Image: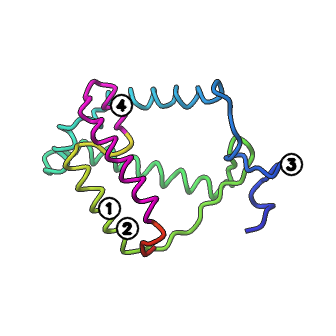
Amino acid sequence: MSLENKNIDDEGINASQKKENTLANLKYLIVGIFFGIVFVKAEIISWFRIQEMFNLESFHMYGVIGCAVVVGLISVQLIKKFNIKTLDGEKIEIQPKTFNKGQIYGGLLFGFGWAITGACPGPLFAQIGTGATVIVVTLVSAIAGTWVYGLIKDKLPH
């Protein structure tokens, strides 16, 4: 990949690598709080809703996930069709992915963890924010699993 495709500035830094001050990062906190509220109100962080999904007792979570997939598909197609750029003017490049059987094993492991704990990594903080402090165990486990993967990823078949 050539440098001109990465939209590198005079200092040789990609816009996604630029450091922002604390005040500039406040926008991420606000968006995170907003999404947490939406997750709580939509009941997608509810352990009971997640158990209903895995027991095939309710369509609620499948509907939410299905809508997210459809919105994602449409968004990616619009980005590709209209050559949409980031707020910093960078070209959005979506790299082609190749299938790997490890994705099946990883997906199954993720699904088992999700079914057992009633939490996936996205809404962990929202669950903790609602007072379900036992989810801190799941958060610490997710961080530990990510750390272990980082240690052994070079030894794994990719």
The x and y percentages for residue 114 are 26, 49
Mark 1 lies on a secondary structure that is helix
The foreground one among 91 and 77 is: 91
Mark 3 → mark 1, Cα distance in angstroms: 41 Å
Q: Crowdedness of circle 3 by 10 Å Cα count: few (<14), some, many (20+)?
A: few
Please tell me whether residue 69 belongs to the stretch shown in magenta: no
Direction right: furthest residue: 10
- Amino acid at pointer 3: Asp
Q: Which residues are magenta?
A: 123-152
Location of mark 3 (residue): 10
91 over 47 or under it: above or below: below
Mark 4 or mark 3: whose residue is earlier in sequence: 3
What's the mark number on residue 107?
1
Location of mark 2 (residue): 103
Q: Nearer the viewer, mark 3 or mark 1?
A: 3
The x and y percentages for residue 62 are 27, 48
The x and y percentages for residue 43 are 27, 33
Mark 4 or mark 2: whose residue is earlier in sequence: 2
- Amino acid at pointer 4: Ala
- Residue positioned 34% across, 41% down in the render: 139
Mark 2 lies on a secondary structure that is helix
Magenta segment's dominant SS is helix
Mark 4 or mark 1: whose residue is earlier in sequence: 1
- Residue positioned 67% across, 50% down in the render: 84
Q: Relative to 71, is 89 on the left or the right? A: right
Mark 4 → mark 3, Cα distance in angstroms: 40 Å
- Amino acid at pointer 2: Gln
Mark 4 lies on a secondary structure that is helix
Q: Relative to 73, is 37 on the left or the right? A: left
Location of mark 4 (residue): 126
